[in-house]
Image (cartoon, rainbow, N blue to C red):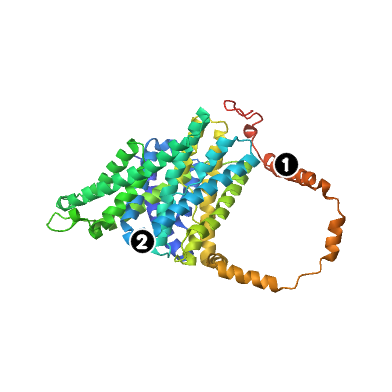
Amino acid sequence: MQDIAPVIAFVGILVFLAHIFTAIFSRTRVPDVLLLIIIGICVGPVLGLASPADFGTVGPILTTITLIIILFESGTALELTSLRSAVGGAMALATLTFFLSMGAVAGITLWLTDLELIPAFMLGAVVGSTSEAVVIPMVRQLRMRKDSQTMLSLESSVNDVLSIVITIALIEAYLLGEFRWATVTGRLIAAFLVAVVFGVAGAFIWSRLLNRIHAIKNAMFTTAAFVFIIYGVVEILGFSGAIAALAFGITIGNVESIRFYIFRRPQASEAKGLSPTEKAFFSEVAFLLKTFFFVYLGISLELISGWLIQLSLVLTAAIFLLRIPAVKITVRQSIPARDASILAIMVPKGLAVAVLAIIPLQAGVAGGELIKNVTYGVVLSSIVFTSIMLLLLEKTGLSALYIWFFLLDGQKIAGYYRRLASIPAPDLSGFQARVSSLDASMLPQRLKTLSSATKTRVKSFFYDFGKPSEYRLKIKGKGEKPEE
């Protein structure tokens, strides 16, 4: 009992700190998510007081339960009007952001490391998604329109499915030597449709039983138990349990406003949604689980070397930069520019990404250790980047720059072009004479030499600045191990 007492005291302190961090976030815009992760990092990798192994099978179960409750609870808060206006933009934003991020990460990784083509795209697919467990609690505390919050929630869920399906497909392609587009497309469509059908149908069935359930004493958590059943069945069938949990929450939260003939109210057993007391209860449960989830996430991360930190920062910066035009292209003009600027910085990764990163290593992919460690770095740096950018948007003039960009349209760009055209052209006759006197026959070779030299310098910088010897892959064979 004496060994357990400090842990119990720590849990109590953690709950108090979580409420204090929420108050700090409302005042200073320093995200409570980041502070909780820092606590986990201090307890885990820094001080070595705890590790994921200490939690055994309880750790993964806790994180899964947290994800289910967060998705379900956020779904109950979504309104059908916001959902209808956000679903198209969320799907477009999720798809474009994911594939842009995956391509950029793969390209940079191929340039700066010795990974092969398919493992490089594996890394891109792993870090291409955002974390629902990080995004949803964060946006719930921001001053955003309902449809903007809904878009972020849906986008993170869609991204998660894309990341899982494509990563597994790439691993299979690496092992078999063949990438099957039809199989991947079928899995993606089935993952969404089957999950949505199970979630919506389960919610309608449960709504018919709620009147009887409410008559039973101490039965408030039975709704969550039913969500767990739906999630488990869908996952066992090989589809997305997360999408099913979100669909269940959205349906049960709006079932009284859905006008189907069989769910109208001709009798006492009509379809019924959650009561305000139940919604408040699940909100509090989600808050507590979120607290422990982020501390566990910090404990689960591993400290990496200087070279891997650099590579992680480069990849994270590329993901953030590509997010800006993706939001500009996909988000409707009716979304306020301030909301669009928040959408543009919301790309934090989470524990699901870190867990997914272990699969290539377990499958025997060459460079799997590199994929895992770089992913850990991207998870931490993406959360830190998001937190810093959120603080800068709220407290500095950076928001004006973002708002200016998202308010740009064709008419304004044409106006800027006309202003530039009205500026008198400088006298370039001397410059043109110099250019005409140059011998351009060797220019392509010079450019090629310059490009090769630049790549060599950049790559050697990454190799020489703290790069561990185990990542020096001299021979890029599928079954070969890195040199010791």
Figure quadrant of the C terminus = top right
Report the Cα–Cα distance between label 1 and label 2: 50 Å
| Mark with earlier residue (1, 2) | 2
* Crowding at mark 1 (Cα within 10 Å: few <14, some 14-19, many 20+): some
Q: Does residue 231 appear to the left or right of 410 in the view shown?
A: left
- Looking at the image, which residue is at 33% across and 36% down? 237
Instruction: Give SS at disc 1.
Output: helix
Image coords of residue 442 (percent x, y): 82, 46
* Mark 2 burial class by Cα count in 10 Å: few <14, some 14-19, many 20+: some
Position of 359 relative to 5 (above/below):
above
Residue occupying image coordinates x 85% and y 57%:
436
* Amino acid tagged 2: Ser
Where residue 117 appears, as percent x and y from the top left, is 59, 36
Image quadrant occupied by the N terminus: top left
Mark 1 vs mark 2: give the one in front: 2
Residue 200 appearing in the image: yes
Return the residue at label 1.
456
Using the image, tell me which numbered label, if any, was put on residue 197: none
Q: Is residue 351 left or right of residue 321?
A: left
Q: Residue furthest right?
A: 437
Residue holding disc 2 = 82
Across and down, in percent, residue 161 comes to 42, 44
* Tag 1: amino acid: Thr
Q: Is residue 457 left or right of residue 303?
A: right
Q: Nearer the viewer, residue 324 or 353?
A: 324
